């Protein structure tokens, strides 16, 4: 996944926030609260780093289960699953497929969605730095300059 996509996804809240506001009956203050959970989720990337470290260590990769479930793709798949779950439940509530959740639950949907972004960022930056280790500072600079 391209880092530009991850950067753009963080700024799309303004596109669908009006639908969220009108369908759920939120006022601007409630919408701002949900947006704060988006920002917290997008910047709390500790779990993605821990998972990346766990699935890319040599000790894990040498185990029988690790041969199938190791490498950066596991981190990307986890982030994709978080994106899907967060967006799906938000969409389901807006579309009326599920009953209107309490605000804190919508905040958790938003947090979960935004937290998926950190898995893509971690995988892209760390893999790039490992693959071009002689220029890791340059790689990180290029990949994070627009984020």
Image: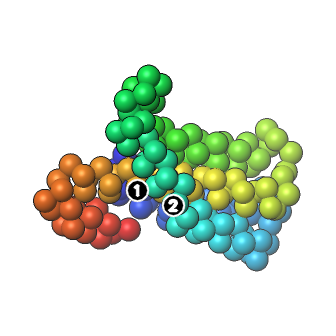
Which of the labelled discs sits on residue 45, or is there none? Answer: 2
> Helix, strand or loop at disc 1?
helix
53 left or right, relative to 14: left
Other residues around mark 1 within 10 Å, as few (<14) / some (14–19) / many (≥20): many
Residue 123: x and y in percent read: 38, 50
> Helix, strand or loop at disc 2?
loop
Which of the labelled discs sits on residue 57, or is there none? Answer: none
Q: Residue at x 79, y 38 (%)?
A: 97
Q: Residue at x 54, y 54 (%)?
A: 47
79 left or right, relative to 1: right
Q: Residue at x 71, y 44 (%)?
A: 89
- Foreground tag (1 vs 2): 2
Residue 122: x and y in percent read: 40, 55
Residue placed most toward the observer, 135 or 77: 135
Q: With respect to residue 23, does 34 lie above or below?
A: below
Residue 68 in view in this figure: no
Other residues around mark 2 within 10 Å, as few (<14) / some (14–19) / many (≥20): some
Asked if the residue under mark 2 is in contact with the one under mark 1, i.e. CB atoms within 8 Å, the reply is yes
Marks 1 and 2 sit apart, C-alpha to C-alpha, by 9 Å
Q: Quadrant of residue 138?
A: bottom left
Which is nearer the N-term, disc 1 or disc 2? 2
Q: With respect to residue 73, does 6 lie above or below?
A: below
Extreme residue toward the left, this view? 134
Residue placed most toward the observer, 131 or 36: 131
What residue did someone put label 1 on? 121
Residue 136 in view in this figure: yes
Q: Residue at x 63, y 53 (%)?
A: 112
Residue 33: x and y in percent read: 72, 72
Residue placed most toward the observer, 41 or 27: 41
Q: Quadrant of the C terminus?
A: bottom left
Q: With respect to residue 64, does 124 lie above or below?
A: below
């Amino acid at each position: 996944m391209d880092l530009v996509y991850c950067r753009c996804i963080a700024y799309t809240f303004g596109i669908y926030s009006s639908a969220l506001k009108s369908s759920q009956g939120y006022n601007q203050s409630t919408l701002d609260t949900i947006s704060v959970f988006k920002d917290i989720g997008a910047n709390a990337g500790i779990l993605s780093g821990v998972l990346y470290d766990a699935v890319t260590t040599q000790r894990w990769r040498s185990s029988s289960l690790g041969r199938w479930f190791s490498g950066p793709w596991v981190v990307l798949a986890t982030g994709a699953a978080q994106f899907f779950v967060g967006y799906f439940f938000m969409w389901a509530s807006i579309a009326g497929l599920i009953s209107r959740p309490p605000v804190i639950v919508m905040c958790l949907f938003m947090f979960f969605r935004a937290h998926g972004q950190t898995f893509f960022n971690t995988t892209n930056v760390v893999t790039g730095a490992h693959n071009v280790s002689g220029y890791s500072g340059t790689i990180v600079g290029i990949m994070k300059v627009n984020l």
